[in-house]
Amino acid sequence: MFTTGQLIFAGFFVVVFIIAMVYVYRKDLGLHKMHYKGSYKILLGFLAFIALLVIIKIYLKE
């Protein structure tokens, strides 16, 4: 389905992309800690909302 060159390019791209993301994240780690304090609460609320929607869907399906 894919040529060897395309697979090599995809693998190289993924590796370089992951390395770049780790580098940028570590570079901005101090800013993240300062500006995004407590953002995990938003994530937990969002996940709870999605879980509630799934529960309501299952309940109404029966």
Image (cartoon, rainbow, N blue to C red):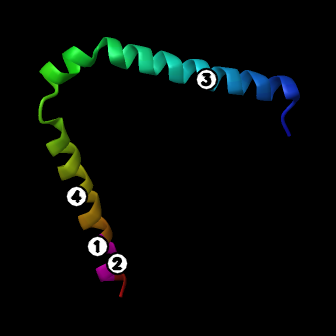
On the rendered image, what quadrant is the N terminus found in? top right
Look at the numbered discs 3 and 1 and tell me whether their residues touch, using CB distance below 8 Å: no
Residue at (14% x, 44% y) in the render: 41
Q: Are marks 1 and 2 in contact (CB under 8 Å)?
A: yes
User: What is the crowding at mark 2: few (fewer than 14 residues within 10 Å), some, or many (at least 20)?
Assistant: few
Q: Which numbered tag is attached to residue 36?
A: none
Q: Choose the circle earlier in sequence order: 3 or 2.
A: 3
Q: Which residue is mark 4?
A: 49
Q: Name which residue type carries label 3.
A: Val
The residue singled out by tag 2 in the image is 58
Say which residue label 3 marks: 15
- The answer to whether residue 46 is left or right of residue 8 is left
Vertical relation: 46 (above or below) 13? below
Tell me the CA gap for discs 1 and 2.
5 Å
Give residue 10's position: percent from left, percent from top. 70, 26
Estimate the spatial distance between the alpha carbons at disc 4 and disc 2, rounded to whole Å.
Answer: 14 Å
User: Within the image, what quadrant is residue 23 found in?
Assistant: top left
- Total numbered labels placed on residues in the image: 4
Mark 4–mark 1 distance (CA, rounded to whole Å) = 10 Å
Magenta segment boundaries in residue numbering: 55-60
Sequence-wise, the earlier of marks 4 and 1 is 4
Q: Secondary structure at mark 3?
A: helix
Furthest-bottom residue in this view:
62
Which residue corresponds to mark 1?
55
Residue 28 in percent (x, y) is at 29, 14
Residue 28 belongs to the span the image colors magenta: no
Q: Is residue 53 above or below residue 34?
A: below
Callout 4, which amino acid?
A: Phe
